Amino acid sequence: MTDAVVVQDFTVTTAGGQALVRCPRLLAGRGRVIGLVGSSGSGKTTLLRAMAGALPPEASARGTLTVADTAPVELAERALREFRRHRVAYVGQDPASRLNPRLRVGALLAEVGGGSGAQALADVELPETLLRKRIRQLSGGQQRRVALARALVRDPAVLLLDEPTAGLDAGLRDRLGDLVRGKARGGATVVIACHDHDWIDRIADEVVDLDGSLDAAAETRTPPSPTASGAPIVLRVDSLSVRADTGANLVTDIGFTVSRGEAVGIVGRSGAGKTTLARAVAGLTGRTTGRISLHGTELPSRARRRDRGQLGRIQLVPQDPLGTLNPSRTVGATLRRPLRLRDRAASRGALDARIEALLETVGLPPDFAVRYPHELSGGQRQRVSLARSLATEPDLLVCDEITSALDPVSSASIMALVDRLRAERGLAVLVISHELEVVAAHTTTALHLDGGRVVAHGATKDVLAELRSGG
Amino acid sequence: MIPHRTTRVLGQLTRRVVTLVALLAITFFAVEVLPGDAVVSSLSQDASDAEFAARRAALGLDQPVLARFWHWIAGVFSGDLGTTARGQHIADLVLGRLPQTMLLGGTALVVTVLAALALGSLCVLRPGGRADRAIAGTAMVALALPEFAVATALVVVFAIWLRVLPAATGTAATSPVALVLPVIALALPQIGWNTRVVRAAFGEQLGTPHVDAAVLDGLSRRRILTHYLLPGAAPTIAAAAATSVGMVLGGAVTIEAIFNFPGLGSVLIDAVQHRDAPLVAAVVALTGALITVVLIGCDAVRAWAGGGR
Amino acid sequence: MALAVAGPWFAPHDITAPRTAPYASPGPGTPLGGDQIGRDVLSRVLVGGRDLVLASLVVAAAVTGTAAVLGAAAALRPRFGAVLDRVADTVILLPAVLGVLVVGLSVPGSGRLPVVVTAVVLGIPFAARVTAAAAAPIAATGYVETAQAAGESLFSLVWREILPNLRATLLTLLGLRFAAAVGVVATAGFLQIGAQPPAADWALMIGENSDGVLLNPLAVLVPSAAIALLAVGVNLACDIAAARWRPKAVRGR
């Protein structure tokens, strides 16, 4: 009998020819636990989903991938449904959103068939009484465990878990580890994608690193230069709160400063208020209380009320997947607009020269000015976005997850560019990211947000250490 | 939880009624302010001034505008719709015809929703497949067809050339067969539109995480359709169906004329030909009220499908 | 559509003078037969489309254009969006055909203008709701946020950042609004609001000639088909053009 999971020289490629995941080798026998690690963008989720027979739209797979003696990506519809129902179970990220909110727990467990729902709940340490409840009546932690129970109730040969420890405290993580080991002893094969190296090293029989397989050049990171003490404070945020339209607070009582040449990181899980904070600083939120001051002058909370000079001094560099650049305008047109707003009298030629200089600053050739965003790679688009923010000669860059959609190589080079701008121009930088590696490598001070409040604030090293230990 | 939900439902209900009153006000004042007094149009050119005055008093037109509006709107809600410019009781005239139009429009609407759901489900079985593309293309053609163009074509083909179905109903619809052609003519464009909406709504639901999970868990297509796609898409589908109510009632005007069908539409045409403003206003008010009822039903569907969130 | 606009120059016969017996079957010189007073149906079909096309085009363009601006503004300013929603909720209670009847009745004998104006006014709120829904995801993109943070005016945000990326939606909407406008304008014509006899008008012809449908079906069928073809043709053309104009997908991660 062959191994339960066999992956050899397996790649998933988009229609455009870009590799989403490349896995040279992964073998897992019955009862084995395999960890899958790699930076975000290395394709952990894509590989797990391929094992359940799902490829991204218009993507194609090459190489060998068999799960429980079946090649899932080649199955016809009916056979694939049988395979998914009886042989394999995939538990995705953010499991709560993956449960039908209109069904009761009992129905959610019964509809996938197999064993007793009560037993499956007991496996994940939930009381049987929950069977009659609806998903929205459960706590977040209970929802995650119901999602896991939904996978276990089928008693699958292969269990695929995508970031199961995200958001769990140390105790829960250990209990999850025990559960996984127990299932493996019962004969199941478990593949776990995880960025929590310590945990996965403890419970996995073997760990496969997908990053090594992407042809990544060695990352060149400029360690952040320690801020000269006494550098003037650029941004000061005092007791900032932002309310949603529903009246609930999105962030509460936030305070920090960013000095000239300093990089401050903001970390926290999704929904912790990181992006709200970025938007508030940029003047994009409504019901805001507290003070945001630039060079000691308090700013109006709304961008519309700020004057042109104040607007130019703070620049928001947005997250890429949401569309950093207007797809109907060329790079040149995108860069020309802020330049024109600053200098209504400038001649066309003068602006062209400025555009060229901006492109050069971010490491792009001048002929990129005539390109449209869809003709650029993700990293190039993010460079243009940085160039646009530099057009107003700002004092503060607010970088909101600017690397989250990039592959490790582009991500590293974008952050290196930000470091260089900070060093050369004395820019103050706010780095908002859920990728702890990015914050660790490129900031000196960090804030940890949770539930819209600051739970830790200090040297990046200490904040991240506390965060990793599950605090 | 519960009280919160009740307040919201009540709030929606109030909003619907307020919009209805707003519509009634607009209609009343449109008829009032725009030129073409009911008295002038209902009496012959050479009537004397005294005759005009008498007629105005009889119709209550000598009272202040606001008083008349209050009187009218109170009447609408109590079922007393006043008298036509020609002195008939509007309620008698209209309420006798209303069931006919409701039968025609109601059947067309039911056919529309059922057909759109069936076709939309066919599409979602294999998105991008041959059936999906064929249905989407045909729907795009159907939704652009004006009802009366469909009606005349149906009459010529089925009633005159093939002689399989009756073209004119004449008096009250006696046999169900007489309804077939008018219902098809009314429903066809709406089926086109609603199929598009259902298809898009299903497509959107397919992208949500819990539907993705259901697919990856190997649930049957029927289970996914009935327990996952349908509840999620219900609000959108209900909203489109509610829009169709107005379109069906508007289309009924011409369809009733073509098929000589004795409904509200023929009352309206008669009213328009005689420039009978109070009667037109009454029909508009009634239509608005009918649509409001359907919209309230649509709100209920939304509240149910939202699962109380 | 070209035929409808250019048709009048090709009409072989006078559209008001009888040529044949009432409801005559097709014969030499009158390939589509005669209408209720024996006028040449072919000539009347060729002449009777132009006004309908022009009126529908004006309605569709005015509705789509206004809705585009209002919808984009609504996506950027939620409060305005809420107002727009209320207005659309009210207007949905008044089917366009009824609205046109009311206004056509109140302004007798003034031709097509009231019909066109009413169709535009009643069409805008619903269309604006559609554009607002399409503009909402664009209003949340990074480039719109950046432009807002740069203090761009509402006009500039709508005009430079949102509308260019709504082209495909707007083109589809234009096709749909054109089909709807044909429906409303033609229904009005059918009910003799707007176009008045003895003018040649496809919708009017259907109404006039329906009594003689047994004698010369073509006098009803041909104008019906012409209206259907017009609405469907323009709608499909817009839809196909929109598919081409869809902003090119930005390359994946």
Image (cartoon, helix red, strand yellow):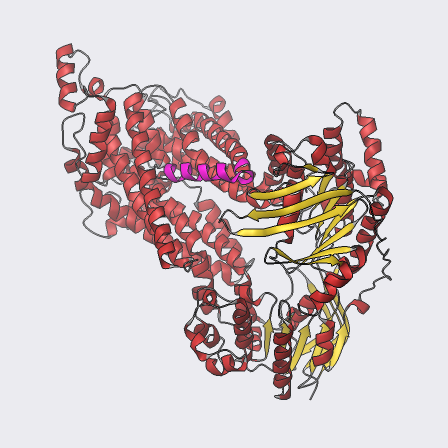
Direction front: furthest residue = A230
Whether the magenta-drawn stretch holds residue A336 is answered as no
> Image check: A363 left or right of B1?
right
Classified by dominant secondary structure, the portion drawn in magenta counts as: helix
Residue B127 versus residue B55 in the image, above or below: below
How far across and down, in percent of the image, does residue C60 sit? 48, 32
How far across and down, in percent of the image, does residue A59 sit? 68, 61
> Image check: C128 left or right of B102?
right
**Closer to us: A21 or A445:** A445
How far across and down, in percent of the image, does residue A468 sit? 71, 68
Task: Name the quadrant containing residue A359.
Answer: top right
Quadrant of the snapshot with the N terminus of chain B:
bottom left
- Is residue A353 visible from the viewing direction of this image? yes
Task: Name the quadrant containing residue A337.
Answer: top right
**Closer to us: A88 or B157:** A88
- Range of residues picked out in magenta: C73-91
Whether the magenta-drawn stretch holds residue C89 is answered as yes
**Closer to us: B67 or C213:** B67
Count the marks: how many?
0
How far across and down, in percent of the image, does residue B84 sit? 18, 28
- Is residue A371 visible from the viewing direction of this image? no
> Image check: C111 left or right of A177?
left
Quadrant of the snapshot with the C terminus of chain B:
bottom left
Residue C115 versus residue B254 in the image, above or below: above
Task: Name the quadrant containing residue A386.
Answer: top right
